[in-house]
Image (spheres, rainbow, N blue to C red):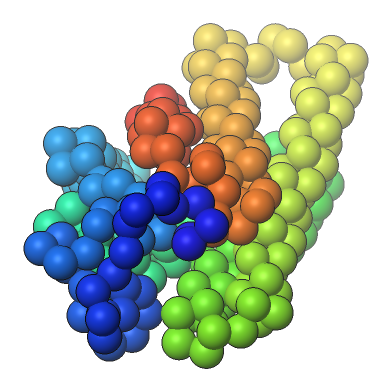
């Protein structure tokens, strides 16, 4: 962070700005010494938290009514994960040096796509023919196995940089997060290709009589949800390309538009 700080900024003697046991606050430390370099928007984060809470309530009702338990559990897990993450960002508004809140939001928000992707894969597996279902379920298992990498990498990089002062370990954490995000994108792209192949074969088999308006809406919105998740993962890759010292990670407008905004447009929610 120090390399990106404007000239003339300094910390009082004996003050630790980041990491476990830090003793910085806005009264004694410049905001530029935080990882993000800004106070998260209170209005934006309250809005996202509220909308995720509404989403959770809707999916709880629909899942209970229509007995779609697995889909409901995935959506509730994703919404609760986001609620915790955005609550932590609200805590960062009041104290941007709050290391616990920083860690919580990094882990919770970064790992969010895993739950929604699991819901998509298994839902589509139920919708397609039995021969194609194992392929979708296999991708679901691979996706879930890779999902901890971004959050774990983010945690490792920030903790090591803060408490151990090890640049090598911090870089390893960033690399782990990038690997996890890259694999998420790769698996999602493969999934999109297989999904498109399935639809092409479906139409070629002359089954268009069963492809009514409801089916068209279902597959259209599922395709849109997949593309939005892919766009969000691509943004996270862009954000972390230079680690936690990049300019993009210190630009909240990117986060609001490409993290929170993309999820709000997701028809799956």
Q: Residue at x 80, y 52 (%)?
A: 135
Front residue of 133/10: it is: 10
Can residue 131 be seen in this snapshot?
yes
Rendered location of residue 57, percent (x, y): 20, 46
Viewer-side residue, 214 vs 74 = 74
In front: 82, or 102?
Answer: 102
Q: Residue at x 70, y 10 (%)?
A: 209
Residue at image coords 41%, 48%: 6
Q: Residue furthest front?
A: 8
Depth check, front residue: 33 or 183:
33
Q: Give residue 77's quadrant in the image.
A: bottom left
Asked if 160 appears above or below 130 in the picture, the reply is: below
Residue 233 x %, y % = 60, 43
Position of residue 84 measured from the top left corner of the image (x, y, whole percent): 27, 61
- Could you tell me which quadrant the C terminus lies in? top left
Regarding residue 145, the answer to whether it shows in the image is no
Residue 120: x and y in percent read 57, 44
Q: Is residue 230 placed above or below 9 in the rendered structure?
A: above
Asked if 177 appears above or below 135 in the picture, the reply is: below
Q: How many marks?
A: 0
Q: Residue at x 26, y 81 (%)?
A: 13
């Amino acid at each position: 962070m120090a390399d990106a700080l404007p000239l003339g900024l300094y910390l009082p003697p004996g003050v630790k700005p980041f990491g476990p046991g830090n003793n910085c606050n806005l009264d004694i430390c410049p905001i530029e010494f935080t990882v993000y370099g800004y106070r998260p928007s209170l209005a934006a984060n309250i809005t996202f938290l509220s909308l995720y809470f509404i989403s959770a309530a809707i999916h709880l009702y629909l899942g209970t009514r229509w007995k779609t338990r697995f889909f409901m559990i995935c959506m509730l897990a994703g919404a609760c994960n986001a609620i915790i993450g955005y609550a932590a960002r609200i805590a960062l508004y009041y104290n941007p040096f709050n290391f616990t809140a920083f860690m919580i939001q990094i882990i919770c928000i970064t790992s969010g796509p895993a739950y929604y992707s699991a819901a998509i894969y298994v839902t589509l597996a139920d919708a397609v023919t039995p021969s194609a279902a194992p392929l979708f379920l296999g991708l679901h298992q691979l996706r879930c196995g890779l999902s901890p990498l971004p959050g774990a990498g983010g945690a490792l990089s920030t903790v090591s940089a803060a408490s151990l002062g090890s640049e090598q370990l911090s870089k390893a954490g960033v690399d782990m997060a990038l690997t996890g995000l890259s694999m998420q994108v790769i698996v999602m792209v493969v999934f999109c290709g297989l999904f498109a192949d399935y639809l092409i074969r479906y139409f070629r088999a002359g089954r268009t009589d069963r492809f009514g308006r409801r089916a068209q809406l279902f597959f259209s919105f599922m395709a849109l949800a997949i593309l939005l998740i892919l766009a969000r993962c691509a943004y996270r890759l862009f954000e972390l390309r230079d680690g936690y010292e990049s300019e993009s990670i210190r630009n909240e407008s990117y986060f609001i538009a490409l993290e929170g905004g993309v999820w709000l447009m997701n028809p799956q929610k």
